[in-house]
Amino acid sequence: MKVNTFLLLSLAGTLCSSLHALKAQTLDERLIVGVSVGVALPQQNFGKSDTIGRKDTTKVKGWATTGINFNVKAGFRLSKYFGVMALAGGNVHGFNASAYLNQNYTNPILQGSVAVNATDYYLGSYLAGPFFSHPIGSFFAIEGRALAGVMTVKYSQLAPVVVFDGSDFNYLITYKPAVALGYDFGLALKYKIIDQIAITLSADYLGGNPAFSGYSVTYTGPTLPPPDAPAVNNGNSRISYMSTGIFNINAGAVFTFF
């Protein structure tokens, strides 16, 4: 009888220990969903608007201005400190039309007679990779990520309008959308409000080297174009690269599901 009682108590103890370990493991393996939005600072050729150095026709500048970034992410914690994450993000940036005019229409005859309408840039990022999380006290944690995947870029569509000799000369410059390998490295500070909800402040660097496989320049107006007019081409297939880097600084919320 004593032996049976001892065995029952041992089995009960083992079962309790197993349930406790399973519960702890479950708490470590959490599904995490987050959203964030913030400011985006263009870097490399994407953010350049100068003409220093020799012009390289295989590279294109972006003339991009400060924009906004937004993203949605989902992660699964494999252990207390590490996990995997998937992220879908977007960036919207304006085009520095005044800098573009000052450097591409320098003929004194055209001073004050050229305007450029430009659409915004749209960049998408679809990335995945590992992340780590380390608690700092009871409420804070520092997190990092290293992701890679696909970057898509829709170059700004430019529409220069030249008023010359009493006539309007209208151009439309369009690049084909580009797809490239993208990567993202980031750090975040997370503050836990409750176990399931936290707020984050993060900074990351998004990069890539998209290749535009061609562009077109269409024109409407008088037969004789004005000085310094862009060459009309309805299907140039030249590949142009635009090194792209963006510093994103975001604030957001993270929701944890057990």
Image (cartoon, rainbow, N blue to C red):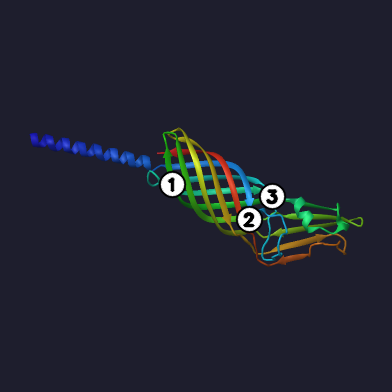
**Residue 232 figure quarter:** bottom right
Which residue in the rendered view is the most extreme toward the bottom? 237
Q: Can you say whether 76 is above or below 4 in the image?
A: below
Which label is found at residue 120? 3
Residue closest to the eye, 129 or 43: 43
**Comparing labels 2 and 1, the label whose residue is closer to the camera:** 2
Residue 2's spot in the image, x, y percent? 8, 34
Looking at the rendered structure, the secondary structure element under dot 2 is helix
Looking at the rendered structure, the secondary structure element under dot 3 is loop
The residue labelled by disc 2 is 44
The residue labelled by disc 1 is 132
Residue type of the residue flagged with mark 3: Asp
Which residue in the rendered view is the most extreme toward the front? 53
* Disc 2 to disc 3, C-alpha distance: 18 Å
* Disc 2 to disc 1, C-alpha distance: 28 Å
Q: Earlier in the sequence, mark 2 or mark 3?
A: 2
**Residue 53 figure quarter:** bottom right
**Left or right position of 165 against 184:** right
